[in-house]
Image (spheres, rainbow, N blue to C red):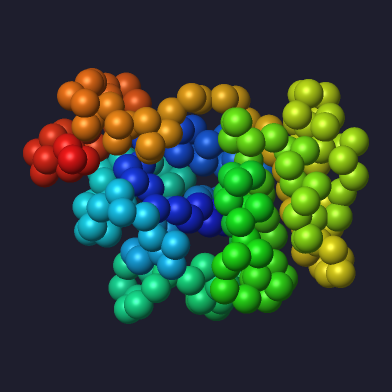
């Protein structure tokens, strides 16, 4: 069994998240993808709304989705949401499965700032997905990815759809860089549109849009 772990604040969840998850699931024939919303991220930004709203919106977005589900593993935990603890717990729960941590280029580059990154990088395989304006070539600065700049540039040019690299100093783990179709939508832009009274229709599921309106979220 192969399971994708998709973490983030999902503030709010939108079609970009859903399409990215489906692309990864299909490309790697994953059994399912588990969305893990961060309850209280250590590097919390002011714009992140209450976790109960973010959790509920994910539930609505995933309703009826055959291969997607939500985990409350971080929602139930007290204190900060550290990825290291989450991955350790998920490894224990799904001990018979191969787990893949799904994240964007910019998030992967931020891992050195997380709690015990050297331990985290050895606990799970990674799938790094394209997310403009960030480029795969930027990954050359990562202390963990054992790959040449030429390979990363070929990914950026579309000459390669994916590339599997090893983790430096740990050949038992792999890091997969994956190009996915570009969907220009972000939580930042959605929040901005809501603040200025613009429509966000078709940028997120209708159920999520209705929830935002009903609860007057992101209005400033």
- The quadrant of the picture occupied by the N terminus is bottom right
Question: Residue 64 at what x, y percent from top left?
Answer: 32, 41
| Residue 143 shown left or right of residue 102 in the figure | right
Across and down, in percent, residue 111 comes to: 62, 61
Question: Which is more toward the observer, 92 or 11?
Answer: 11
Q: Which quadrant would residue 193 be assigned to in this image?
A: top left
Say which residue appears at 80% left-offset and 41% top-offset.
163
Give the quadrant of residue 205: top left
In this rendered view, identify the residue nearer to me: 60 or 85. 85
- Residue at the outermost left position: 214
Q: Is residue 60 above or below residue 154?
A: below
Q: Is residue 132 left or right of residue 74?
A: right
Give the tally of numbered discs.
0
Which one is in front, 2 or 206? 206
* Residue visible at 60% across and 31% down in the picture: 133
**Looking at the image, which residue is at 32% across and 78% down?**
78
Task: Give how far across and how far down residue 6 sits, in percent.
Answer: 50, 52
| Vertical side of 215 occupied by 125: above or below | below
Which quarter of the image is occupied by the C terminus? top left
* Residue 127 visible in image: yes
Picture coordinates of residue 165, whole percent (x, y): 83, 51
Q: Does residue 206 appear in the picture of this structure? A: no
Q: Is residue 73 above or below residue 30?
A: below
Task: Say which residue appears at 87% left-offset and 40% top-offset.
Answer: 149
Q: Nearer the viewer, residue 60 or 14?
A: 14
The image quadrant that residue 95 belongs to is bottom right
């Amino acid at each position: 069994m192969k399971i994708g772990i998709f973490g983030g604040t999902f503030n709010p969840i939108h079609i970009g998240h859903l399409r990215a998850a489906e692309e990864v699931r299909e490309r790697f024939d994953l059994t399912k993808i588990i969305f893990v919303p961060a309850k209280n991220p250590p590097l919390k930004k002011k714009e992140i709304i209450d976790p109960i709203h973010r959790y509920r919106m994910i539930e609505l977005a995933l309703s009826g989705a055959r291969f997607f589900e939500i985990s409350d593993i971080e929602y139930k935990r007290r204190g900060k949401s550290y990825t290291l603890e989450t991955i350790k717990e998920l490894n224990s729960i799904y001990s018979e499965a191969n787990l893949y941590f799904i994240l964007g280029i910019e998030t992967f580059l931020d891992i050195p700032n997380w709690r015990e990154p050297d331990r985290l990088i050895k606990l799970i395989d990674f799938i790094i997905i394209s997310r403009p304006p960030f480029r795969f070539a930027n990954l050359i600065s990562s202390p963990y990815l054992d790959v040449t700049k030429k390979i990363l540039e070929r990914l950026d040019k579309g000459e390669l759809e994916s590339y599997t690299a090893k983790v430096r100093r740990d050949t038992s783990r792999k890091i997969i860089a994956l190009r996915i179709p570009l969907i220009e939508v972000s939580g930042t832009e959605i929040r901005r549109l809501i603040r200025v009274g613009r429509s966000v229709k078709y940028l997120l599921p209708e159920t999520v849009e209705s929830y935002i309106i009903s609860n007057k979220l992101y209005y400033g």
